């Protein structure tokens, strides 16, 4: 809902997109150079700016508390997945 209000169209099925896969157990996955990664939400911008590569928003949601904070492992893993997806093509 928030993504659609921000001008994005949510992607719920891979269709003909070779960068996305569907897994019956994990749902929608994005393909990286080293493997497939589960992602919480994927959205495409409704109005693409001219002369640039298509923009896609990948959303990974986490819920943490003071007793279970975000640690360095979580940050490194997120950045590693981002880098892997960027290097797919």
Image (tube, grey):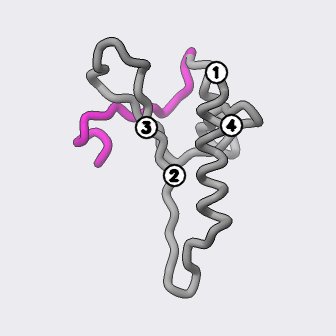
Residue at image location 49% in from the left, 57% down from the top: 61
Is residue 6 on the magenta stretch?
yes
Gap between marks 3 and 2 measured at Cα: 10 Å
Kindly identify which residue carries mark 3.
57
Report crowding for label 2: few under 14, some 14 to 19, many 20 or more residues within 10 A (C-alpha).
Answer: few
Residue 44 in the image: x percent, y percent? 39, 29
Kindly identify which residue carries mark 2.
60
In this view, 35 is above or below 72: above
Q: Hey, which residue is sitting farthest top in the picture? A: 51
In this view, 16 is above or below 45: above
Q: Nearer the viewer, mark 2 or mark 4?
A: 2
Q: Nearer the viewer, mark 1 or mark 4?
A: 1
Residue at image location 33% in from the left, 29% down from the top: 45
Q: Nearer the viewer, residue 2 or 13?
A: 2
Kindly identify which residue carries mark 1.
89
In the rendered structure, find residue 23 and report the number of the disc placed on it.
4
Query: What range of the chain is rendered magenta?
Result: 1-16
Quarter of the figure that contains the C terminus: top right
Gap between marks 3 and 4 measured at Cα: 20 Å
* N-terminal-most mark, 3 or 4: 4
Secondary element type, mark 4: strand
Gap between marks 3 and 1 measured at Cα: 17 Å
Secondary element type, mark 3: strand
For residue 8, side relative to residue 17 (left or right) = left
3 and 2 marks in contact (CB < 8 Å): no
Snapshot quadrant of residue 24: top right
3 and 1 marks in contact (CB < 8 Å): no
């Amino acid at each position: 809902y928030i993504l659609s209000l921000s001008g994005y169209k949510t992607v719920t099925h891979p269709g003909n997109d070779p960068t996305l896969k569907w897994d019956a157990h994990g749902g929608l996955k994005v393909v990286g150079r080293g493997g497939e990664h589960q992602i919480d939400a994927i959205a495409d911008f409704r109005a693409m700016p001219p002369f640039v590569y298509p923009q896609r928003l990948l959303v990974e949601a986490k819920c943490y508390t003071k007793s279970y904070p975000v640690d360095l492992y979580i940050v490194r893993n997120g950045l590693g997945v981002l880098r892997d997806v960027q290097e797919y093509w």
